[in-house]
């Protein structure tokens, strides 16, 4: 297994023999993506783990708001064959739910908590998935959904600074020296509390 | 008696002023070593007075009382220390073992106070300080007992006069291995870099000092300066022939402290287990060899 | 009025004596500022040159400290997410008074490039009082050093009163903290 093409063929063989694959995408020379049904995820991850892809590098979700779907992405890695394998599965956007893969990869515990926090996906089978991890005391819809407006949230939640004085130089020829003097006087007053230096 | 106590307090005050100035000068020297300008020489005084001018919080009476007890213990220890072979507050009470006992009062007070703060880093720091103490005391005491055996007295003044009368035969020349062991143990006592495990600002957030701020930290700094003075002065008196006048003492003191500081600044930090294995390996071996050579064979220069 | 042999010494009132002591304390405080570096933002990269031989912070008597209890300045370097703001408030309330806050970069001033983020606050002085802002994204090291010298000037002229403001407007600051953070103390599996 020295050739990278052979490696990709090997991965394709392993996965297509195990489950029906909807779509195969070659991301690059070392990365392959398989789109499968959500019911086959556990089976294909078990097969991959037994054939050497025993490290779960990452797990996250993508929000396809036009299709009204969430896409879960599991990224596994093999230390002998240098190929990353992405396993993608789409789930419904309304009441999203996906059985946890905790029995296969115990390290997924915190990725699932993160996905629940940022996308609101439920993971039955993971006892802690509903606990707060990164966002503390969150009080809105999950923030990485596409229908969440971060700017509106920021405006509502965090006070903004208002600028009473306009320091922008409109006419650079005449005004800049005066503006600079004004700025310096103001800075000096702030520094010394209005007294003479 | 009152005169003696006043002289003792004067010695403690002298210790504080001297060590604080020398520490400030050493910060300047280290700054120059690192191609910096460095702080003013009286920066350490400013730091201490600033800390005393700040407001501070308390963590219960053990926390407050422990600091005062430690400071009192250290000032009490400094009062017994002779500066030169003539200047000594309490004649005939400057035995080496007095310092061993009284230094423990300061350390104990600090340990009590730090544990009273309830911070886990403080407990870890105290534990490491005691472990380091256990490590350096053994080789150091073997060398000191050799010196006491050779000079026939355990009085600090007596040891100084013994070295001076024999034609300035300093023990660091007479017992070269023992001198090296003494200096390494001094580095451990001062908490200088290879043995800085119990302060370790980046690792355990300055260890025992973690919960101190304001006035308590200021008192702790004074305590630290005086205890450094006691330890360096012990080395000067035991190994460098003491001093006949105060200028000689100042020169020897400055040289010893600066050397320790310079060595400290080109070293990394040991882990606590490395400190213990280090002290129980080479310094202990050298100390025992020196004792055997000096006492049983009598090969003393 | 100076007292001489011929004029009787004027008796100073209690307030005047306190003020004199405070001025003496101010001299020590402004010449020995110890930093607690809260380096979560990218402006922290400006601190190594400020500390080492390029600008040598120590010649002003400044230096890094390990814990909030020992430090005088809380140095906020860069953006603050909600999660770090909570820890920052813990830290600020642990410091012993007088305490000062220096904020680096444009993020603590108005949010900077994170002004529309759901996780990053926009204005630090709504939550804790800030004595000196150093603007810039990121400020260069001269500006950082200038900020420290400004703080010394403020202490000299008795205008570095952030910690007094925090006491006077404690309810207002707590209100703002609660509005943005929900609750300032966190209770979850990692904090018990």
Image (cartoon, grey):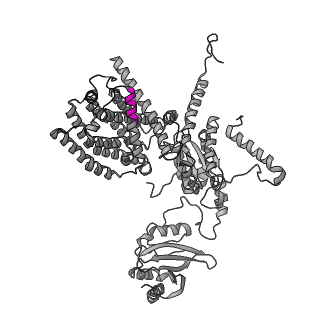
Q: Is residue B247 magenta?
A: yes
- On the image, which quarter does residue A144 sit in? bottom right
Above or below for C40 versus C8? below
**Which residue is at the far left?**
B296
Could you tell me residue B72's position as x and y percent?
37, 30
Q: Is residue A155 magenta?
A: no
Query: Which residue occupies 36% across, 51% down?
Result: B270
* Residue B203 makes an appearance in the image: yes
Could you tell me residue A160's position as x and y percent?
68, 54
Compared across the picture, whether A84 is left or right of B283 comes to right
Which is more toward the observer, A131 or A47? A47
**Image quadrant occupied by the N terminus of chain A:** bottom left
Could you tell me residue B198's position as x and y percent?
37, 46
Query: Which residue occupies 48% across, 70% down?
Result: A112
* Residue B64 makes an appearance in the image: no
Compared across the picture, whether B173 is left or right of C81 comes to left
Could you tell me residue A169's position as x and y percent?
79, 53
The span shown in magenta is: B246-254
Compared across the picture, whether A108 is left or right of A66 comes to left
Judged by its main secondary structure, the magenta piece is helix
Above or below for B219 versus C129? above
Number of marks drawn: 0
Which is more toward the observer, B99 or C66? B99
**Image quadrant occupied by the C terminus of chain A:** top right
**Which residue is at the far top?**
C6
Which is more toward the observer, B28 or B136? B28
């Amino acid at each position: 297994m020295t050739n990278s093409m052979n490696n990709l063929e090997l991965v394709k063989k392993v996965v297509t023999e195990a489950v029906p694959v909807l779509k195969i995408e070659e991301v690059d020379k070392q990365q392959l993506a398989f789109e499968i049904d959500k019911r086959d995820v556990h089976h294909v991850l078990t097969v991959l783990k037994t054939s050497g892809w025993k490290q779960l590098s990452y797990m996250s979700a993508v929000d396809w708001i036009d299709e009204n779907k969430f896409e879960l992405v599991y990224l596994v890695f093999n230390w002998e064959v240098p190929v990353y394998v992405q396993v993608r599965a789409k789930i419904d956007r309304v009441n999203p739910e996906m059985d946890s893969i905790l029995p296969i990869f115990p390290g997924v515990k915190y990725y699932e908590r993160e996905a629940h926090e940022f996308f609101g996906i439920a993971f039955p089978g993971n006892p802690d998935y509903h606990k707060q991890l990164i966002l503390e005391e969150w009080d809105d819809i999950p923030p990485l959904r596409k229908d969440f407006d971060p700017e509106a949230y920021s405006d509502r939640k965090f006070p903004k600074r208002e600028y009473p004085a306009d320091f922008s130089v409109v006419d650079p020829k005449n005004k800049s020296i005066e503006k600079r003097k004004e700025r310096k006087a103001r800075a000096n007053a702030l520094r010394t509390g209005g007294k003479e230096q | 008696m009152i005169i003696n106590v006043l002289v003792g307090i004067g010695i403690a005050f002298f210790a504080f002023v001297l060590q604080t100035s020398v520490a400030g000068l050493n910060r300047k020297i280290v700054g120059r070593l690192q191609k910096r300008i460095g702080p003013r020489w009286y920066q350490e005084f400013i730091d201490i007075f600033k800390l005393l001018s700040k407001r501070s919080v308390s963590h219960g009476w053990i926390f407050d009382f422990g600091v005062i007890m430690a400071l009192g213990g250290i000032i009490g220890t400094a009062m017994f220390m002779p500066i030169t072979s003539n200047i000594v507050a309490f004649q005939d009470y400057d035995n080496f073992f007095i310092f061993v006992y009284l230094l423990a009062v300061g350390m104990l007070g600090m340990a009590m106070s730090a544990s009273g703060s309830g911070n886990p880093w403080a407990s870890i720091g105290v534990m490491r300080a005691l472990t380091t103490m256990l490590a350096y005391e053994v080789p150091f005491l073997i060398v000191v007992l050799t010196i006491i055996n050779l000079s026939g007295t355990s009085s600090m003044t007596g040891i100084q006069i013994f070295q001076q009368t024999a034609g300035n035969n300093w023990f660091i020349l007479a017992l070269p291995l023992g001198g090296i062991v003494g200096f390494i143990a001094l580095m451990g006592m001062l908490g200088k870099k290879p043995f800085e495990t119990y302060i370790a600002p980046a690792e355990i957030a300055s260890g025992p000092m973690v919960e101190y701020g304001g006035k308590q930290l200021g008192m702790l700094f004074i305590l630290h300066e005086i205890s450094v003075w006691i330890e360096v002065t012990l080395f000067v008196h035991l190994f460098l022939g003491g001093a006949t006048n105060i200028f000689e003492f100042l020169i020897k003191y400055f040289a010893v402290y600066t050397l320790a500081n310079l060595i400290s600044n080109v070293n990394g930090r040991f882990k606590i287990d490395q400190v213990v294995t280090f002290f129980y390996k080479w310094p202990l071996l050298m100390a025992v060899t020196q004792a055997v050579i000096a006492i049983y064979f009598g090969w003393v220069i | 009025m100076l007292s001489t042999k011929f004029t009787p010494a004027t008796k100073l009132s209690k307030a005047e004596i306190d003020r004199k002591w405070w001025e003496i304390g101010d001299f020590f405080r402004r010449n020995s500022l110890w930093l607690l570096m809260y380096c979560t933002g990218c402006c922290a990269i400006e601190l190594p040159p400020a500390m080492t031989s390029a600008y040598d912070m120590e010649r002003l008597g400044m230096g890094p400290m390990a814990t909030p209890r020992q430090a005088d300045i809380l140095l906020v370097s860069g953006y603050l997410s909600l999660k770090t703001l909570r820890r920052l408030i813990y830290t600020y309330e642990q410091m012993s008074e007088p305490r000062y806050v220096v904020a680096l970069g444009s993020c603590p001033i108005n949010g900077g490039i994170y002004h529309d983020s759901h996780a990053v606050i926009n204005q630090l002085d709504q939550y804790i009082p800030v004595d000196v802002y150093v603007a810039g994204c990121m400020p260069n090291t001269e500006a950082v050093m200038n900020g420290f010298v400004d703080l010394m000037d403020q202490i000299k002229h008795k205008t570095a009163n952030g910690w007094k403001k925090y006491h006077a407007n404690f309810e207002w600051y707590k209100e703002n903290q609660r509005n943005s953070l929900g609750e300032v103390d966190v209770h979850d599996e990692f904090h018990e």
